[in-house]
Amino acid sequence: MEEGTFVHTLCTPHVVCPPLCTPSLIHPMLYLQTATSAVVLSGHTSEVFMCKWNNVKPSLIATGSGDSTARIWDSANPNLPPVVLRHAEVSGEKNKDVTTLEWSPSGDLLATGSYDGVARVWAMDGSVKYTLAFHRGPIFSLKWNHDGTRLLSGSYDKSTIVWDMANGTRECQFEVHDAPALDVDWNGTDVFASCR
């Protein structure tokens, strides 16, 4: 299997495997498998760091890569080109790796975080709804609250930010960690945890 390859077995719920890295191979691909067949989705030009199925629209899967793009693929129509979400003007631009991604609870928006410290919220057509630029380091984690009204980000800059999704503004920022905020998660709509 090639660098950045993911395998999903459709007969087993909730299986998304981590990348299997082989440094000598240069064409990252996403593999979708059943017990009898496999579909290969290719297009990224660098390693694929993560993938996330859409819980509302189960044929859609998003991927994030070191090529400065995220992509939205339709596994029901693998011959269709993916929607490409460009985080840089030039593919592979330094510090634009997509480091995290998360679907909104409605399944209509995709939030991405990148190494440049900018979070972006994308519509299904690939347009940017919000650019959330306040972190001073790479974003490691993004999570929507349960009703999709807020987005939480955790960063290398040791802070977490709550973003208001009604208007894409910073609601509040917490700088309580003495090391990078590696993960964040919501409990309902108003309570969250972050860890380092």
Image (cartoon, grey):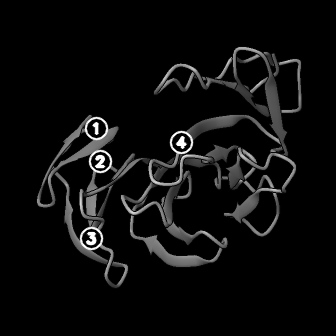
The residue pinned by badge 4 equals: 52
Q: Residue furthest bottom?
A: 167
Please name the amino acid that badge 4 sits on: Lys
Q: Give residue 185's position: percent from left, percent from top.
A: 25, 44
The residues tagged by marks 2 and 1 sit, at their Cα atoms, a distance apart of 5 Å
Cα–Cα span, label 1 and label 4: 27 Å
* First along the sequence among labels 1 and 4: 4
From the viewer's perspective, is the residue at label 2 or at label 4 nearer? 4
Where does label 1 land, which residue? 179
| Image position of 91 with respect to 8: above or below | below
Q: Nearer the viewer, mark 3 or mark 2?
A: 3
* Mark before the other along the chain sequence, 3 or 2: 3
Above or below residue 112? Residue 47 is above
Disc 3 to disc 2: CB gap under 8 Å: no
Q: Which amino acid type is marked by label 2?
A: Lys
Q: As displayed, is residue 72 above or below residue 148?
A: above
- Sequence order check: which comes first, mark 2 or mark 1? 2
